[in-house]
Each structure stands twice: as C-alpha cells, then as structure tokens.
Image (cartoon, rainbow, N blue to C red):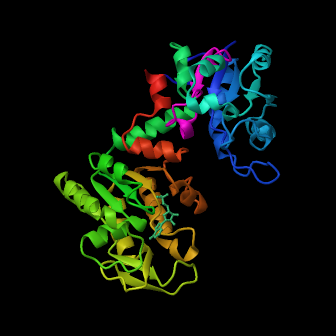
Amino acid sequence: MKTINDFNFEDKKALIRVDFNVPLNDEFKVTDDTRIQSAKSTIIKILEDGGSCVLMSHLGRPKGVDEKFSLQHIVDKVSEVIGVQVKFVNDCVGASVEEAVANLKNGEILLLENLRFHGEEKAGDKAFAEQLSKLGDIYVNDAFGTAHRAHASTAVVAQFFPEKKCFGHLLAKEIESIDKVLNNSEKPVLAVLGGAKVSSKITVIENILDKVDHLIIGGGMTFTFIKAQGGKVGDSICEDDKMDLALEILEKAKAKNVQIHIPVDVVAANAFDNNAETQIADVMAIPDNWQGLDAGPKSLANFEEVVNQCKTILWNGPLGVFEMESFAKGTIALGNYIDNATKNGAFSLVGGGDSVAAVKQFGFADKVSYVSTGGGAMLESLEGKVLPGIDAILN
Ligand code: AMP
C-alpha cells in the first residue's frame, strides 16, 4: 500500500482529493471542521517536504454551478486550520486553473472550485479526469468519505498517474483500521450493530459473520429478530418481510459459531416522544400500543460482559433512539463499556451511518481507538466491497 510517506514531495505539486464536504450555516460559515482537520496531516507532510498542494473536493449536491455550494466559502477556515493562507481558483479544470497551478510555489496551497459544478465529476468522465490530472505531479487520495464512489476525482484520475499515486494519511488510517477489525484482528472480535433497520444492515451482517466471535444486535433491528422468534413487539419498529432473513442469520451464526446477543429487555414507551410514559418490558412481551426505544438494564449488563471479553470491537449504529434524551441511556452505556475496554487494550472502531454522530454527541470520539470519517464508505467496506477509490490506488 503506497502512502505519501513513500514519496518525497520536494518541488512537486500534489493533486490531493480531500473530503471538504463540510456543513455550512446560513451565513456560509463552517459549523464543523472535522473533515478539514482530518486532512491536515497529509497537507503538512507535503508542504514540509518542500512541495505544494492542489486541493480538490466536492461540497453538497449542486446541479451545475451554484454559488451556494462554492468552496470559496471555506477558504478562510482551511487557511486557519492548516495555518497557511490558501489560494482559490473559481473552477477546477481549464486554462485559468492550469495557470494558477503553474504559478503555485513550494509551500503554497491552492483550493479548486467545487468538482460537482461539472456533471462529468459524478459521471466518472475520463476526459474530465484527464484534465484534472494536468494539475499535479503526484495524485493523492485522502477522501475516505467518497472512496465508495467511482467519480472522476476519486478513482478515474488515478489511471493518469500509474507510478505516482498514493493514499494520504487519513485514507491510509481508515484502511488500516478496517483491516485491524476485519482481517488482522485480535480475538475475540465483537461487532455491535444497532440502528433502525435490518434491511440497511443485512449485507454487513452477512459479511461480518465470517469475521467475528460475538455479534450484538440492538436498536430498532432487535424487533424483527424478536418477532421472528415468536415474541410480541407491540408498536416497535419491525420489518415483517425481513423475519425469514432474521431467522436465517441466526442459523448461519450458529453454524459459524458466532454468539449472537440480542436485548432481553427494553425501555418501552407509549409514544415515539421524549416525554412519553415509559416502562421496562421483557423484549418478548412488549404490551400492545407500546414500543421499544432503548435497551433495558438486563440487556446492558449482558452487553457489558460481552464487551469486556473482547479484544477487537466494531460499533455501528445506536442501541436506541439516542436523539431523544429519554432513550439515549443504552447508547451512552455502551459507549462507556467500549471506552473501558479500549483503556484495557482493546482496539475499537466506530463508523458508518449515525454511529459517528452519537459518539461525538456523547463525547466518546477521543475514547475509542478510531472514529471513521466515512458513513457510506465505511458501511460498504464492512459489506466486504472493494471501494473504487481504494482500488484505483492499489491497482
Ligand atoms: P442507522 O442509520 O441505521 O444506524 O440508524 C440510526 C437510527 O436508528 C437513529 O436515528 C435511531 O434513532 C434509530 N433507532 C435506534 N433504535 C431504535 C428503535 N428502537 N426504534 C426506532 N428507531 C431506532
């Protein structure tokens, strides 16, 4: 695996695909700069080598040129985070951009305008990718958030740098972390899968059954498994058309010697509301008109025991409706167990979908070994897919 550490960037222009798809407020100010912070180490290494950086990214989902999605809005924030005044050019291909790149000196950074102002970016257009390729000597992919997309800047452009392409520090760290959980893991390995629906996690479950010793299934998925086994789930979220699949998963897990842990009790509410009445219910006997919205105390005690035994932990998806304070306790408790396990030497990776939001909201981001920066890309990795952005560098 080639990373930027395998290159000396002295007098070289690095064309770097970053993921600066950051949230902006009504005044177009960056409200969360995590993604910019995440690219810092790659940019600094290249500048310290004596090279320069041409940064390319998308922002939002513009349909053509749209001022609202201009990367100009983030120039000051990027300059502040990196500590170097960043230059900006108001397109990402063409003569004016090539001129700006030609004028770029060692130690300088140039940010290109939003790649998605050109439809060719998402289409993975080869001619567009070739135009991009003129903007650097070495291609660096450091955008995990878009690594599952075969777009011009994330994958197609790599073919124009047969010997001079590599991963940035962030993308390398993501790849290593996934590898540490799925392939080179210290046993016992635990995956905690929560979240809303079985249907969105099914491929992940099927893939990781070959990789883990323990699987905790929590969140809204619980109830499809419980109803499939004859339980009464009341008004809880449940996918009736996935019940056969749930039973199949349980069978497969048994055959593969994977221990499955499902909540035995839940915090049930009489409405999907933070102020609803609640009671602790046996997961197999949730009263009519009540719905399970969080894991109950007995379940949490079981989960704590499992987490404590494991040396590798993957966490994807909350244990309850964590957005409401009344149903966040299970997710917070799980975060604490994983925090403890990590302190005792376990490797813990959080990623995919909403898990990152939950982990950040409750202050666990610094307490686990690694928090992935890519929701969709992480899920696809866990599904066992080869991501185009990674494949384009490796092959
Ligand atoms: P996902 O994106 O699949 O990880 O799902 C995250 C969502 O699952 C969050 O918005 C949670 O509120 C939701 N969720 C977790 N547990 C439950 C539950 N018991 N009932 C309904 N929604 C849930």
Q: Between residue 260 and residue 118, name the one nearer to us.
A: 118
Residue 103 image offset from top left, x and y in percent: 80, 15
On the question of residue 371 being in view, the answer is: no
On the question of residue 315 being in view, the answer is: yes
Residue 246 image offset from top left, x and y in percent: 28, 61
290 relative position to 271: left or right: left
190 relative position to 335: left or right: left
Q: Name which quarter of the figure residue 123 lies in.
A: top right
Quadrant for the C terminus, please.
top left
Whether 70 is drawn above or below 286: the answer is above
Residue at the outermost left position: 255
Whether 11 is drawn above or below 360: the answer is above
Chain part drawn in magenta = 133-153
Quadrant for the N terminus, please.
top left
Q: Is residue 125 magenta?
A: no
**Residue beneath the point at 48% across and 50% down:** 352
Q: Name which quarter of the figure residue 52 lies in.
A: top right
Q: Name which quarter of the figure residue 81 lies in.
A: top right
Q: Between residue 277 and residue 114, name the one nearer to us.
A: 114
Whether 226 is drawn above or below 27: the answer is below
Q: Is residue 145 magenta?
A: yes
**Residue beneath the point at 64% across and 32% down:** 119
Residue 344 image offset from top left, x and y in percent: 41, 54
Main SS of residues in magenta: loop
Q: Between residue 379 and residue 156, name the one nearer to us.
A: 156
